């Protein structure tokens, strides 16, 4: 199976980056070209422990769904 790796350098503290990963609306803001939408779970705000959200989007011409779940909060 091919592996695609993307490295993004961010000029911010790890705590800030982690906080942004919990915002369910942020991916929608930056992925309009893929038609990404939330199809299940938390639809706005920040994920809390145990919450999940399911996204649907077109990547490489194929419609895909992926789920994000807040299973733990440890950024050490």
Image: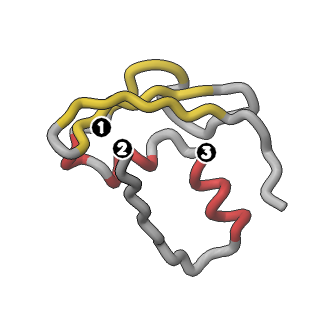
Query: Regarding mark 2 in the picture, which secondary structure is present there?
Result: helix
Q: Earlier in the sequence, mark 1 or mark 2?
A: 2
The crowd level at tag 1 (other Cα within 10 Å; few <14, some 14-19, many 20+) is: many
Q: Residue furthest top?
A: 40
* Residue occupied by mark 1: 36
Q: Residue furthest bottom?
A: 11
Quadrant of res 18: bottom right
In the displayed structure, does residue 41 sit left or right of residue 46? left
Q: Is residue 38 above or below residue 35?
A: above
User: Counting residues from the N terminus, which is met first, the one under dot 2 or under dot 3?
Assistant: 3
Asked if disc 2 and disc 3 are in contact, CB closer than 8 Å, the reply is no
Judge left or right: residue 60 versus residue 6. left
Secondary structure found at label 1: loop
For disc 3, the neighbor class at 10 Å (few under 14, some 14 to 19, many from 20) is some
Residue under the image location 61 percent in, 39 percent down? 46
Judge from the rendering whether residue 19 lies leftward or rightward of residue 34; answer left or right.
right
Q: Quadrant of the C terminus?
A: bottom right
Q: Mark 1 and 2 residues: CB-CB less than 8 Å, in contact?
A: yes
Q: How far apart, in angstroms, are the residues tagged by discs 2 and 3? A: 13 Å
- The answer to whether 69 appears left or right of 41 in the picture is right
Compared to 14, does 39 lie above or below?
A: above
Label 3 or label 1, whichever comes before in sequence order: 3
Which residue is denoted by mark 2 in the rendering? Answer: 28
Q: Position of residue 33 (x, y in %)?
A: 19, 49
Element type where label 3 sits in the image: loop
Inter-mark Cα distance, 3 to 1: 17 Å
> Which residue appears at 66% of the width and 64% of the height?
16
Q: Which mark is residue 22?
A: 3
Residue beneath the point at 35% across and 51% down: 2
């Amino acid at each position: 199976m091919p592996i695609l790796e993307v490295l993004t350098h961010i000029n911010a503290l790890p705590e800030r980056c982690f906080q942004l990963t919990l915002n369910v609306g942020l991916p929608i803001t930056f992925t309009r070209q893929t038609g990404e939408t939330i199809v299940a779970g938390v639809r706005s705000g920040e994920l809390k422990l145990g919450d999940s959200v399911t996204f649907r989007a077109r990547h490489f011409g194929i419609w895909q769904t992926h789920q994000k779940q807040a299973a733990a909060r440890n950024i050490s």
